[in-house]
Image (cartoon, rainbow, N blue to C red):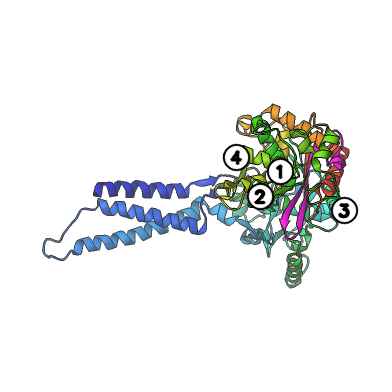
Amino acid sequence: MRTLLRLIGLVGGIGLLVYGLLPSDLWPYPQPRFEGGRWMALLWAGVLLLGLGIWAALPAVRSPSTRVNVRPGLLNLSLAFSLLFVALTIQLLRNEFIYAASIYNRTEPNPQTGTVISNSRPLIRSLRTQRGAIVDRNNVMLAGSRVAANGIAQRIYPIAQQADIRAFSNLLGYASATYGLSGLEAQWNGYLSGEQGQALRSLADDIYNRPHVGGNMQLTIDAQLQHRVWQLLNQHAEGRPGSVIVMDPRSGAVLAMTSTPGFDPQSLALNPDNSDAAEQQRITQAWEQINADENRPLINRPLQAQYVPGSTFKTLTAIGALEHPEVQRQPQPIDCPNEYRPDPNAPPVVNAVGPPNHPDQPPLEAIIREQAGTVDLSSVYAFSCNTAFAQLGVRLGQERFIELAERFHIFLPQHAPARSPDFTDLPTAPSLLSVDPEFLSRDLALADTAFGQGQLLITPLQMALLGATIANDGVMPQPYLVEAITDPHDPAVVLYQHRQPFNLLNQRRLISAQVAATMRQMMRAGVTIGFGKAANVNNSGGKSGSGEAGNGIVHAAFLAIAPVDEPRYVVYVQVENGRDGAGLGARLAGDVLRAAFEILG
């Protein structure tokens, strides 16, 4: 018995502690696998198991001169104190050595307000640090540093002289001695502060008490396109919050990523020419004003906001129907009825056009037959038939539907990581297939999810990646924003260079090239004969979506690729409570595509 306890305790305890200490990710520094209460529970479970193994290994010793078991009692007490010492040692090892950089540079965005909580010590320590410049793909300077007469460095934003700085705010983030760092300033602080990538020079600067000079960062975005997209988003959304992503599907490079309303990072940057008291008051007022905005300008919506995608999600269901063509024919050929009842005891699925909700309009199936000639997968996709896709979802079934979604990194809640695995340049929320782990066990839930409703909560980035996979012949690109970081003293020395994974084709091929090609043609029909005609730009393809989020709120969205024969751009637009994806969403996506072709060619 003791042998078994010894084996379980020693192997289990050591294994549990080692597993808990292993990082989940090494970039940009080791990231802990477990945080907070989960780590403490694992730590004590491992220590107790280890204690059980050690106790079982101790010999049963009795004092030779007394019947009282003094010696075993002392051994047990010593063991208890030793285990406490072991727990303390492991905790110190974790916090002060393995994850010291992670804890020091930790940022925690509040999903409700967008406020980012970070350690302000790195910035306070580096008030004299000349943070590296941040430039766009054409070396247009977005952010830089100015050193005042007193030696204190100020973060400046030259782009504000030629564009609205708010267009860049959610990418750049802020650098505030009072409120810490956010955005790229936080995620890439090591490079921008000169503490990473320049180890020997950083050490010498510390020894000689010289100010650090950070590396210069080049982004993939085009500043002109970023600003134009920002203007278009504000023009079409008319004050409503929203987001737009423009991506090159061949490389994954983010060409523009805007989030409205945005904020002015200049208002949070310390001006060393003014008195400390005046600056503190000014920055505090600016912070309070930003956080008082009910539209939460600190949220980087393309990456951190999760939405019901509406009919843009039919793109994923259509892929499932192409991979399993039998669901289009069995038990009968796919059609577009006015109503579909996956559950006889629940309200039916209905279409957004025609009866029963709009009896003054002709049935959607009649519209499809008149405009497309036949009812098939391509036409029900182009005309966004809810009842057809609800049937397809039920026919695919729970197991195949979940596998398809998780292949595209849209997770069940119990499988979802803390952050999206696809984009690491900035903090990104995961996308969820449901909130309730058992939600999809019912046919009604499968039906609702298949046409973009249910409990879906998906980031705009993940929907853009769905389109990028189709555009890139079935291979999901690895999206990125930071192209390179160079030495501030010698631009020829590259401190960081983005590289595609060596096994990209093997790891990230999600669908066949044939399925991707078919989907592109179906998306083309969506803007030529379907409801997305306003996005018909340079041989584009697309799909609209209107996501019902409850309380009468309907989010407008549109997914577009162009040109469909050789895709160069993927666009995803999202306008909160924009109501009509085929109207507002398609018009915005079309104008964004025109801007991309005009500015980038």
Image location (x, y in percent) of residue 13: 37, 50
Circle 1 residue: 313
Secondary structure beneath label 4: helix
Mark 3–mark 1 CB contact (< 8 Å): no
Q: Farthest left residue?
A: 65
CB contact under 8 Å: marks 1 and 2: yes
- In this rendering, would 399 be left or right of 7? right
Percent position of residue 381, x then y: 76, 38
Alpha carbon separation for disc pair 3 and 4: 42 Å
Can you tell which of label 4 and label 1 is closer to the viewer?
4
Real-space Cα separation, disc 2 to disc 3, in angstroms: 28 Å
Task: Provide the secondary structure element on which disc 3 rests.
Answer: helix
Q: Quadrant of residue 594?
A: top right
Q: Residues within 10 Å of mark 4 (few under 14, many from 20)?
A: some
Q: Position of residue 236 (x, y in %)?
A: 86, 52
Q: Nearer the viewer, mark 2 or mark 3?
A: 2
Closer to the chain start, of discs 3 and 1, is: 3
Q: Few, some or many C-alpha atoms within 10 Å of disc 2 (few <14, some 14-19, many ≥20)?
A: many
> Which one is closest to the eye, mark 4 or mark 2?
4
Which is more foreground, mark 3 or mark 4? 4
Q: In the rendered image, is residue 420 in sight?
A: no
Spatial CA span between label 3 and label 1: 26 Å
Q: Position of residue 275 (x, y in %)?
A: 75, 70
Q: Secondary structure at mark 2?
A: loop
Dot 4 or dot 2: first in sequence order is 4
Q: Which mark is residue 397?
A: 4
Three-letter amino acid code of the residue under disc 1 = Phe
